[in-house]
Image (cartoon, helix red, strand yellow):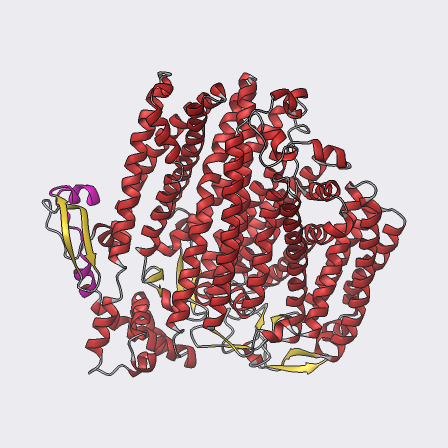
Amino acid sequence: MEIYIALKVLWAVLLGVLLTGLAVMVGMDMGVGVLLRLVGKTDGERRTMLNIIGPHWDGNQVWFILGGGAIFAAFPTLYATSFSIFYVVMILLLFSMIMRPVAFEYRSKVDSTKWRDTWDWAFLISGALPMIVYGAAFGNVLEGVGYHYSWTGQYYQDESFLSYLLNPFAVMCGVMSLSLAVYQGGAMLMLRGEEPIYSRARTYARLGAVVAAVIFAVGGVWVSFMNGYVFTGTVDPGMAATPLGGPAVAAKAGAWLNNFHSYPILWLAPAIGFIGMIVGAVALQLHMKIVGWWLGVLSWIGTISTVGIAMFPFLMPSSSVPAESLTVWNSTGSAYNLGWMTFFAVVFVPAILSYTSWCFYVMRGKVKVADVVNNPHSY
Amino acid sequence: MPLIDPNVVDLSRLQFALTALYHFLFVPLTLGLTIMLAAMETVYVITGKQVYKDMTHFWGKLFGINFAIGVATGLTMEFEFGTNWSMYSHFVGDVFGTPLAIEGLMAFFMESTFVGLMFFGWDRLSKQAHLAVTYLVALGSNLSALWILVANGFMQNPQGASFDPNTMRMQFNDFAALVFSPDAQAKFVHTSIAGFVAGAMFVMGISAYYLLRGRHREFAARSFRMAALFGLISTLAVVTLGDALGRLDQQVQPTKIAAMEGIWHTTTPPAAPWLITALPNDATQSNSMEIGIPYVLTPLVTHTFDQPVLGLVDIEQANVPRVDNGIKALIALQQYGATHSAASLATFKQYENDMGYGFLAQRYAPNQDVNLITPALLPSVEQQAVLSSIPNVFVTFWSFRVMMALGFYFVTIFAFAAYYSLKNQLEKHPMLLKLCMWSIPLPVLATEFGWVTAEAGRQPWTVFGWLPTFQSASSHDVGYMIFSLAGFALLYSAFIAAELYLMFKFARLGPEDHGAAAHHAPANASIATPIFATPGYANKSWE
């Protein structure tokens, strides 16, 4: 049993790692997509921007796919419930996500302004929308989502999808996520782009970092007043993974701060987030672009771990039937499955990080507009 | 518990089928072309001949156009289980999600990370390092297929997990049984190699187009020969493995085999005929217009002369006791969920293996509640449930036949193509070349029919014998489904139009011009552009 509890906690942490990897790598590419028309004024500049992330976007995007697969395996009921509950939003996310691979590969293959403009707009939509949805999903989950289960484990939805779309707190989280993506993407453009891309990207990246910091602060205050969720029944962390028949749960204003009050050291997480965003903006101001990029990573780590710590052990509380809330204790896979998943993660995550780094190393250096326009292999 | 609106189930099935079949328009070419690119580049690295480098570049470019949509539409697949099949995902996520996650970790990351270097790394990597990168892309794409088919194998023959009444789902308990499931392994090889056939036909067909027009002769002849030989070996392997798969299914999914062969009544070996053609009627459970060859079915399906092949009507009647047991299992399970009593658990355990048939009966129970089935109602519920326990025979029978006919056609065309290519007589046989060209889409079509055979033949289950399809879907509104279906239709139509446009454009332009055409020449670039005008060729900047 104790091993099972350890595995559950480990996979809650790995879920965070995965969501961070996704946010950093996919977010960076999304940020570049959003900035495509703002930073790139000529076709050559835009192509250069695309080629800066050109060799990497495909690999980066796998974080998103792996996110889907790993949540499916490690948190089956969470995957089943959340993806269905957020159906309309998830489908919009999918529609925008699937435009991207095609946009990269097809945009520059036809020499027509109309064709390329169309794909440029696809980049904007497919950059902005997924990041807003990504952040808004965190916002919605923090606020609790209306659902309950039948005895077979089938979920039933208790509120309309509009409450997820038109939800001020969630939209604010979405804007924060978009801002961080612009920060990360802008920093990448500074790393591998030359003037005038460099300066324009710097302006937007700094703006992204500052906006994110402001929203993070506002969000923190907001969360301290809104309803969090707490167990009121006896909790058995080693319980069988089912949302049915678990301990009682109550909604309570300010409850998301309980973990921080219990363990003040955890305030480090939001502090790291703030340092990432504010020092990051300063670093970019000082042209310290590598430091700036890594502080962007730190911003994501700080933000996502803040949300994770605030909610732990809740993953997606149910606002309509709180006792059926999905938590780390009741929605993971079996111990056997988590064991195998851990084995594969331990073997392959380091391998992935190494060969991804190697690819960035091979493709290092500035991407020049003239080279891109003359290279038969560029996007 | 009311069941999900049947319209929502149907629309969810339609959406899944369309998005999966659409995704698989692009997957076979990815599987086949990565292997062929690796082979071409190997020859280039060993011999140093420029033509093989040109081949790697040119077919690589067409591969890229195809790969992008494959990746894009694959995203849909990874998310659709959650967005549209929540009960399924909850029920088997613990064992079915795992191979999908491993696929991401082990295969897809590798394929996608290195594909970037494959396209962008030509002048940044040594010849050998670039070749290694191409190998990793090919390995990654085929390992991807392995894990996806391991997942699919579980749907076909659920081994490696057992049902846990405490969590109301199948729980993973045997890694080796899951991964080395004979169904999964045979299907993986069958599907991957079917992809090789598609890649070979693609390269051979486009090369034939150049040969017919007398363009890029050396390039086309070498590409053609490589593709013809690769295609011939691959088609033979596909047919052999298809046969092995059929034998396996006879043991684990007798309903599918019976539907594929249109067999309603258990056969009397060895004289039972193999049906070349028939019109199966699912309503009357009989065939009309049968034309068959006697003495072929028994050895073909069973590889013996004395084993009967079970007929669907007989399977249905044999399922009657399973429905009874399944109803008892479900009632006990529901009680166990509410009370956790040892008695209900013991009853459930007794009938556990027939639980899925209880789900089938639920559809025909009063208020869709199995507790309300009275002894008087039982016979009618039983009959309706067993009638729904077999797949649609017309669809399974014909999709199997189309796939198989195409398979034998491929053996023939690759045999002739390889023969004349080796004798250097291709240009004397323009009809064959034309046929090769027109056959480009056929292997992809055959794969699609293969999937229809496999998945329509699996019905009425999503997890064979355990969870019916109509129980598996998410409880959406019809409006949601119309919204997503309309969006997919719009987006996917635009994609295929763009894909075909680019594919035709670059195939017509041909190898020499591909570097220049992509980036300088207007869309109507003439194929007569002199070679020296192409920067890539003029200064060999890519080396």
Please tell me whether residue B446 is drawn above or below residue A303 in the rendered image: above
Q: Along the horizontal axis of the image, is A5 left or right of B440?
A: right
Question: What is the quadrant of residue A150 in the picture?
Answer: bottom left
**Furthest-right residue in this view:** A286
Between B162 and B405, the residue placed more toward the observer is: B405
Q: Position of residue A34 (x, y in %)?
A: 71, 54
Question: What is the quadrant of residue B13 in the picture?
Answer: bottom left
Q: Position of residue A211 (x, y in %)?
A: 80, 63
Between A60 and A243, the residue placed more toward the observer is: A60
Say if residue B244 shows up in the picture.
no
Q: Is residue B310 magenta?
A: yes
Between A353 and B441, the residue placed more toward the observer is: B441
Q: Is residue B293 magenta?
A: no
**The magenta stretch spans which residues?**
B294-317
Residue at 31 percent of width and 25 percent of height: B416
Q: Quadrant of the C terminus of chain B?
A: top right
Q: Along the horizontal axis of the image, is B336 left or right of B124?
A: left
Q: Quadrant of the N terminus of chain B?
A: bottom left
Say if residue B478 shows up in the picture.
yes
